[in-house]
Image: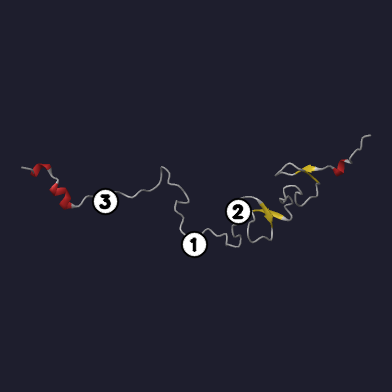
Amino acid sequence: MLISIPSDRRDSKCPNCAGVIQPEAIMCRFCKRGISTEHFRKCRFCGEMIRKAAIKCCFCLKDLTEPRSGHPPEGAPVPRRPLHPLGAGAVTLPLPEPEEQDAISHDPSKED
């Protein structure tokens, strides 16, 4: 005996774990990750789906209440590596010239 499923009531797959879920599902019952963009949004740090009202990501544990401006908040640690790596067209600083006294003491024309 075959049971036919109406065409408007087809199950879909979770984009994270491929588990079979209902089309109107808000969260996957298998992997517990958010699916609905009405209730969830992507974390700006790790890209995982988190609740829209979240103040801290449950995956990467980053604080989501920080302002999103281009400048870090005052007192924030300085990154160890540059945000934009230097390319071929980058400006470089010239090397310092040797001091005059060092140049005179190493002058080969004044040697005995």
Pair 1/3: label in front: 1
Q: Mark 2 belongs to which amino acid? A: Cys
Asked if residue 63 is positioned above or below residue 108 in the image, the reply reads: below
Q: Is residue 84 left or right of residue 29?
A: left
> At x 92% / y 35%, what residue is drawn?
2
Which sits in the foreground, 90 or 78?
78
* Image x and y of residue 40, in percent: 71, 54
Residue at the far right: name it.
1
Closer to the chain start, of discs 2 and 3, is 2
Name the residue carrying label 1: 76
Residue at the far left: name it.
112
> At x 15% / y 52%, what residue is drawn?
101
* Image x and y of residue 56, in percent: 63, 59
Q: CA distance from mark 2 to mark 3?
A: 45 Å
Q: Mark 3 belongs to which amino acid? A: Pro
Name the residue carrying label 3: 96
Check the picture and name the quadrant holding the N terminus.
Answer: top right
Q: Residues within 10 Å of mark 3 (few under 14, many from 20)?
A: few
Q: CA distance from mark 1 to mark 3?
A: 32 Å
SS state under label 2: loop
Q: CA distance from mark 2 to mark 1?
A: 19 Å
Closer to the chain start, of discs 2 and 1, is 2
Check the picture and name the quadrant holding the C terminus.
Answer: top left
Name the residue carrying label 2: 60
